[in-house]
Amino acid sequence: MSSSGVRSRFISDKSAFVPKGSLAYFKEESPASESEQYKGVQLTESESHTRGKDGSFHEGGPFYTARTKIYVPYLHVDLKSQYYYGWTYKGPIYTPPPALIRTPLDLYKYRPKDTSDLDPYGAEAISFVSPGVPSNELSEQLIEQKRDGLPSLPGVSSWKERANAVKAAGSEYLNTVFGWRPLVEEIVSFAHIVSHSHGIIKQYQEGAGGNTHEEFHFPIEINTESETRESIRPEFPGFSTNWFDDVSVQGTMQIDTTDTIRRWFSGSFTYPDLSATDSVDSMDGHARNAEVLLGTKLTPDSLWELAPWSWAVDWFSDTGDIIQNASNFAELGLIMRYGYMMEEHSTNTTHRIPPPYQIHGVEGLVPPCEIFTISKVRRPANPFGFGVHWPELSPEHVLVALALGITVLL
């Protein structure tokens, strides 16, 4: 077997992989190219979305695309039979491409249209990157404050009578008889807790409605498979295989496939504000009263004038309301302005006839045929998680989403 070089032509047929007529593959129009490339096909399904006020696209629907390309390199040969009836062949030989390039492809077989199998991956990713539910943290911190050295509500209610008794007594008996110092320490400790609790609420409010972007990448999955097929002969376009009965051209084909899967999550987390409640507004006044009390040198007269008993009792009620509201928000679960689970699946399959391959007693190398397929998927989440649908949510869920300006699809 002799070779006169590698020749190829780029096929740009948009409707099929193979142009009509077998010899059309190998017109020698582009000697500089090293392989025959079939254009392949691509399928894309998506939906359009409007641009946000900041000029960016923060919303998107489901997206699917899959593309396949096939490369069939060939070797140009000049053969002549040694037998009496004789034959000659001058042209390309190549590894037989799989039947799939001769018929239209169903690209969904590479990646099913139903992408719900990505929901468990999305839920797992959220469990790793979730910044926590601030509403739950707020209620826990306020509860801890109320437990940490805070006098009981009945104890606070008794401050007025205890302060009045101290005020009516002489200074010589204040510390020993009427317990002036323990009363002052108790009220000052309470004022510190009120001020600290207000700081916790303010910190929560400053972050409310904000966005925390998080991403999570799963380990890349790489799988390889190999198979061998017997009794394979190269392709000789335009030649009947019966013409080669006088030579041993049977061989084996090695098929190697490599699958690579990448999956990752991208989302933006947020939480609602509590400022719409009257209790939050009241907490501002309680904090100011506490700061005045902490900034004053307390005497029986000044304590009586500051009169902490009324707002101190109200603080218990308002704090309880805020804890309840925060707990209600926490029960609604995690809220995302957007959340997407993505997957990219690429497959590289090589069909090769391993050397040495003999044609008419001469060893030669038949170039391999390669198939490249890639699919890309984007699956959007509901603001409350993957696999969650709007009709399944409670009215409270919907109201919170609306308060955050999240589009509700019912």
Image (tube, rainbow, N blue to C red):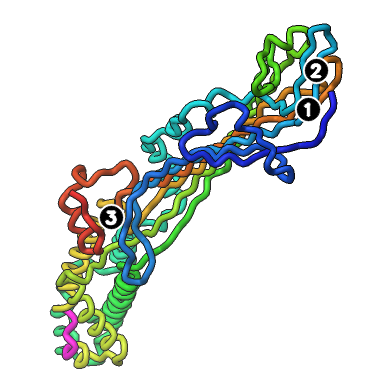
Q: Earlier in the sequence, mark 2 or mark 3?
A: 3
Name the one closer to the observer, 154 or 371.
371
Q: Mark 2 points at which residue?
A: 359
Question: Which mark is in front, 1 or 3?
Answer: 1
The amino acid on which the numbered mark 3 sits, given as a three-letter code, is Ala
Q: Which amino acid does label 1 sit on?
A: Val
| Mark 3 closeness class: few <14, some 14–19, many ≥20 residues within 10 Å | many
Instruction: Name the foreground residue: 343 vs 382.
Output: 343
45 over 321 or under it: above or below:
above
**Mark 2 against mark 3, which lies toward the viewer?**
2
Label 2 with label 1: CB-CB less than 8 Å:
yes
Q: Is mark 3 on a helix, strand or loop?
A: helix
Range drawn in magenta: 304-309
Q: What element carries label 2?
A: strand
Marks 1 and 3 in Cβ contact (< 8 Å): no
Q: Residue 77 carries which label?
A: 1
Q: Which of marks 2 and 1 is in front?
A: 1
Tell whether 299 sits left or right of 370: left
Identify the mark nearer the N-term, 2 or 1: 1
Q: Where is residue 391 in the image (x, y as percent from the top left)?
A: 19, 44
Residue 176 picture quarter: bottom left
Mark 2, Cα crowd under 10 Å, few <14 / some 14-19 / many 20+, is: some
Dot 1 or dot 3, earlier in sequence? 1
Does 334 sit above or below residue 65?
A: below
How crowded pointer 1 is (Cα within 10 Å; few <14, some 14-19, many 20+) is rated as some
- 3 and 160: which is toward the camera: 3
Q: How far apart in space, not on screen, are marks 1 and 3 (Cα)?
A: 74 Å
